[in-house]
Amino acid sequence: MGRGVWTKLAGHVLPEGPILAGLLALLRWAPRPTLAAFADFYPVAVLAAGLWLGWRFHRSRLVFALLVLALANWALRAFPPAASAPPPTQVILQATAFLLPLNLAAISIGSERGILTPAGLARVGAILLQVGLVAALAQRAPLASRAVFETAFLPGALFGWTRLGQPVLAAFLASAAALTVFLFFSSSPAPSRAFLWTVALAFLALRAARPGPAATVTVATAGLLLVVAVVEASFTMAYQDGLTGLPGRRSLTEELQRLSGRYAVAMVDVDHFKKFNDTYGHDAGDQVLRMVAARLGAVSGGGRSFRYGGEEFAVLFPGKTVDECLPVLEELRTAVEETRFTLRGRLRPRKKPDAPKGSGKKRRHLSITVSIGISDHEETDLAPDKVVQAADRALYRAKEGGRNRVAQ
């Protein structure tokens, strides 16, 4: 399998996979005294790291998610569940289990609107209001509240594996379904995926008959997944282009610094892109850049593509020379040229066409072309930026030569 396939597969299991594997190993093989001691400081460390990260990088969703997880963890430790637990304790635990997934889903789907802003303070107020409501129900109407949480929609024999009431299970199921749908349409999958895993871990912790240290560690690990997701999302924002999905210029710079010996760099520019943008608008221009990036992302010959800036891209070929890369680049240039870009709906030209309405085809198919310049590095003392500059000069020669060609 190629590098792109491995990268895609890794994206489905990292970083959650190793963290969850570590959690399972800890719960399975750690002695109970060790687990209990770990449960005393682990949640505090995750909470402190997450609060600092959320405050420092303005990630309010992380802060609020950790807050509700911390409250749930406190409830588990302060009111340990038991078959003989008094009604107020049962109400607190059932209400906590009911509200936790709903809060996590709402926080995930919501936007980053700050912590000490009016929207952020409103979220804090909503969380505190829920705490007050649960306390009031447990104190003033414990029997009636317990009866609500024990409402059965389906035969009770189906749910003997958990102490959670059916309304609580419905809340977890609805939250997981909403997060799954949101993940499918999300442009930033790492945080959305982490929230979905967080709901799953919260369920595993809360469903246990005797949670103890294992439940505390599980809930804390759910918080850790959210912390790591913020780090991963920040890394992606810094190193990956948001429009095309290709690695950005910073990634190219660092990749070049790591290379030694022979390599080639190709600079790729979309022909007449400014004119296209002026004629059809920036939305159409963005669609063109994504189409070209898709072709570049599938480049063969061991090349790796980057968004360099504007309508310019770069392709790095480690261990290759110009002569070895020319057939690959010709194939790439032809693939872009043969891809028909279709103008639809809101991508119509800004100026009304001369042809009367209804004449000709309803959709226009345009041919997009690129010019490519390439240079290679065979001398150990040649700086990477010099190789890029040489490829850029070759790109200008390709444009001056009539565009839609490869020059060296």
Image (cartoon, grey):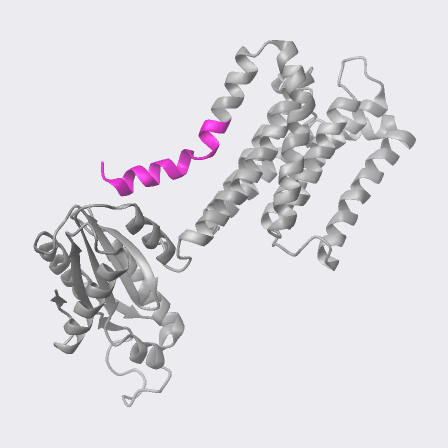
For the point 62% across and 13% down, the residue is 34
Q: With respect to residue 305, does 12 lie above or below?
A: above
Where residue 351 appears, x then y in whole percent? 36, 86
Q: Nearer the viewer, residue 41 or 17?
A: 41
Quadrant location of the N terminus in the rendered image: top left
Identity of the residue furthest to the front in this view: 381
- Foreground residue, 31 or 191? 31
The image shows residue 399, relative to residue 337, as above or below, that is below
Q: Residue 180: give x, y in percent of width and height.
A: 51, 41
Residue 96 lies, in percent from the top left, at: 74, 32
Residue at figure coordinates x 68%, y 30% from the top left = 44
Q: Quadrant of residue 72?
A: top right
Residue 301 appears in the rendering: yes
Q: Residue furthest right?
A: 140
Residue in view at x 62 percent, y 52 percent: 58
Q: Residue furthest bottom?
A: 354
Number of labels in the image equals 0
Residue 63 in percent (x, y) is at 66, 44
Q: Locate residue 223: give its quadrant.
A: top right
The stretch in magenta equals 1-19
